Amino acid sequence: MNQHDTNENATSSFSGAAPFDPARLAKRMTMGGHGNFLGMHYRDHGDIWIELGLDWRADLVGDPETGVIASGPIISMLDNATSLSVWTRTGVFRPQVTLDLRIDYTRAATPGKAIIARAECYQVRRSMAFVRGIAHDGDSADPVAHAVGIFMLIDGQEWIQS
Amino acid sequence: MNSQELPPYALAMGMEIAGIVDDSPLVAMDFSQRAVGRPGYLHGGAISGLLEMAGFAALAAELERKGIAVQIKPINIKVEFLRSGLPERIFARGEVLRAGRRVANVRIEAWQADRTRPVASCWMNFQLSPKKA
């Protein structure tokens, strides 16, 4: 991971960068694999933020006694939403990896309610992007979780080698 | 704790209790399309979900050993992603650093073929409260 820091020209040297359409990539990201299994979907985006949604489902429950959704799907949403927020802000799709992600569970989600994850990229450096976000179940002023994390930005060549 | 006691989310993801290592349950998950992030690799959220389950299982086992019956709720989690998750079976195991009266602190690691090359490492804090009657 350390070698990424020394790659001073990461931004300018990556020639494969294509114009980034947040809605299109978010939809593609949730078409297969884990995002598709969870039922994650694109909702909206702005200059530096993006919003994903997830409907409550019995097989995603973490506590059968209460019907509260597991925290795993909430982490997955916040991982995807924060990741997408970087490309939304920079306007280019460039490979990146999650360095770390912290989630504070501020309250249990309401059983049966859909979850919305809203994430923003609040700072970008040559080799790092700083992100934060919330997950809520209808009232963004009363989130179920807060997230903060860092993505390491890597150039195309390095991506292929790893 | 055995696999039948895992919550619906864990079972849907294919997680299972694969054994006990040094008093802590070993939680395993076979590779499947349900766990894929970028093509060919495990999703960070799926890895995190496995870490959480191993943290919860480690704490539940520790409290059971001590004969303490309390409710366990996660307060927070911080995951460091160390290596790409390859399309193969993944394991996670937690270690309870401290289980007090109100809070428990747990460390968890996930790995694949090589135990000495962890895929992810994390800490979790849990809130302990009296069981509702």
Image: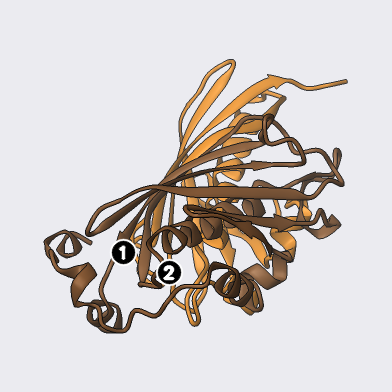
Chain colours: A brown, B orange
Residue that appears at 63% across and 52% down: A72
Residue A1, relative to residue B35: is it above or below?
above
Residue B43, relative to residue B53: is it above or below?
below
Q: Which residue is mark 1?
A: B117
Secondary structure type for disc 2 = loop
Residue that appears at 50% across and 71% down: B42
Amino acid type at image mark 2 = Gln
Quadrant of the snapshot with the C terminus of chain A:
bottom left
- Callout 1: residue from which chain? B
Q: Residues within 10 Å of mark 2 (few under 14, many from 20)?
A: some
Quadrant of the snapshot with the N terminus of chain A:
bottom left
In the rendering, at what x and y percent does residue B64 appear? 65, 32
Residue that appears at 50% across and 62% down: A84
Q: CA distance from mark 2 to mark 1?
A: 8 Å
Q: Which residue is mark 2?
A: B112
Secondary structure type for disc 1 = loop
**Between discs 2 and 1, the one toward the N terminus:** 2
Furthest residue to the top? B101
In the rendering, at what x and y percent does residue B81 appear? 38, 57
| Horizontal relation, residue A40 to residue B105: left or right | right
Residue that appears at 49% across and 56% down: B92
- Callout 2: residue from which chain? B
Near-viewer residue (A78 or B107): A78
Near-viewer residue (B56 or A110): A110
| Horizontal relation, residue A82 to residue A14: left or right | right
Near-viewer residue (A115 or A85): A85
